[in-house]
Image (cartoon, rainbow, N blue to C red):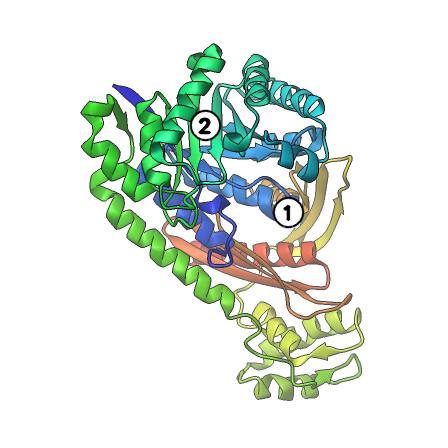
Amino acid sequence: MRQIVISDATMKQNSEELRLTFKEKIELAKLLDKSGVDLIELDSIKDTRIDALLIKSIVAAVNNSRIAVPVELSNADNLERTCVALKNAKNPRLQVCAPTSAVQIEYLFHKKPEAMLEAIEKTVSACRALCNDIEFVADDATRSEGDFLSKAIEAAIGAGATTVTLCDTAGTMLPSEFADFIRRQYDAVPKLREVTLGVCCSNTIAMADACAVMAIAEGAGQLRAATHSFTEVSLENVTRILTAKADSLDSCISVKATQISRIISQIERLCHTGKAQNTAEGAENDDGIFLTIHDTEEAVAKATVRLGYDLSAEDTQKVYSAFRQIAEKKEKVSFKELDAIVASSAMQVPSTYKLDTYVITSGNTISATAHIKLIKNDNTVEGVYIGDGSIDAAFQAIEKITGCHYELDDFQLQAVTEGREAMGQTVVKLRAGDKVYSGRGISTDIVGAGIQAYLSALNKIVYEEEME
């Protein structure tokens, strides 16, 4: 029997109804890994600080599924960043996505057909030099001119693509029409039989699942699906069909049919939870009351009482000290910002590690480097690390200093207020054993806030280990 590769693209779907947090995406990846999908597709790296960190965290979280990440056409920097983020993956896959219809080539990418073929060939070749598993994705393949599509497929295979995925972006084909389309591609490009043919079907007229199954019947070896689907093939439906018709299709899949319904129910709850959390934005507005650098510790203490906190004298001093650091950098500190200061400064465990100084060097032509000095037992300890983005470099430098690695369970980055002097709040959650430890950081510098949050969570782990 042929082994059909199942690729899940749940996290690649763009929808206001599917806005997951960092932690929720990691949880989703774990559930997909448990379901038995062969590939988990992620978005390409846009924001190095967040996207690369997410890829690394998902790579560390999954055990069996392979991770696939797209790279941008003719963008060496993006390719390098993607490879760095995937370096610890067991069997990573790089995806080269390119339009093959005349409309998308000319009007969306502003390229001539010849230039697009050259970009495909060069990008696939560059990817193959760094990774053995390369997937060429022909966007809008069913609306492409036959000759050009054949040339694009031949160029990709010649440059080293091991999988070629054809996308029915329009999603208006009947199953028989899509089967004919697949047969024509095999006839036009004989070399297509030497690699894995993948299909991606849109569900515009509710025929995506049937079209995907017909493609398998015609020889396709991979299909893209989604567990929480808006436009993609339904993973639950095709799992049921391919399992029931395994003999007639002479194919099998690794997705566990007996568990898929339960796992998808968990994923549905996770996705709806993320929707609820993300639509409740800006629940509380500023009331226009603020503090300044001229306010005393007593004034700040009264403000914390108004916010509902009952702080000890020691915690009040910590809050006032943190407040002064922020107030020296900006003219006004709102009550909303003060609330974040209390959350990040008060009611904390003793600081085994304290931040002394940090220097971050980054740019579009150099790798991000973090040089961090911490104070432990009145001694200065320091570390330097070159990472994939400022946040990643900083976290890795701290790990180098402490000699401890903990799984990054969640990372949230948000502005507490608006404007040029906006304060940023960062939440970091580290997993040690079966427990998750949360830390918060707040600063006008977002990297500084991330470092503070990481140290806050780290100190809780160290404190508990010492108490035990």
| Residue 34 vs residue 18, the one in the foreground | 18
| Residue 5 vs residue 169, the one in the foreground | 169
Residue named by callout 2: 90
Image height of 373 relative to 122, above or below? below
Q: Is residue 438 left or right of residue 441?
A: left
- Dividing the picture into quarters, in which one does residue 45 lie? top right
Q: Is residue 331 left or right of residue 399?
A: right
Residue named by callout 1: 49
State which quarter of the image contains the N terminus: top left
Give percent across and percent down for residue 212. Answer: 36, 33
| Residue 382 vs residue 184, the one in the foreground | 184
The amino acid type found where label 1 is placed reads: Arg
The answer to whether residue 404 is visible is no
Give percent across and percent down for residue 44. Answer: 58, 39
Q: Is residue 218 left or right of residue 326?
A: left
Give percent across and percent down for residue 363. Answer: 77, 41
| Residue 330 vs residue 384, the one in the foreground | 330
Tell me whether circle 2 and circle 1 mark residues in contact (CB < 8 Å). Answer: no
Q: Which numbered disc covers residue 198?
A: none
The answer to whether residue 167 is visible is yes
Give percent across and percent down for residue 461. Answer: 47, 55
- Dividing the picture into quarters, in which one does residue 38 lie? top left
Question: What residue is shown at x 73% (from left), y 82% (from top)?
Answer: 291
State which quarter of the image contains the C terminus: bottom left
Circle 1 — which element? helix
Question: What residue is shown at x 24% (from left), y 21% (from top)?
Answer: 250
Image height of 346 relative to 12, above or below? below
Q: Is residue 464 left or right of residue 44?
A: left
Question: What residue is shown at x 80% (from left), y 83% (from top)?
Answer: 294
- Dividing the picture into quarters, in which one does residue 447 lie? bottom right
- Say which label, 2 or 1, has the lower sequence index: 1
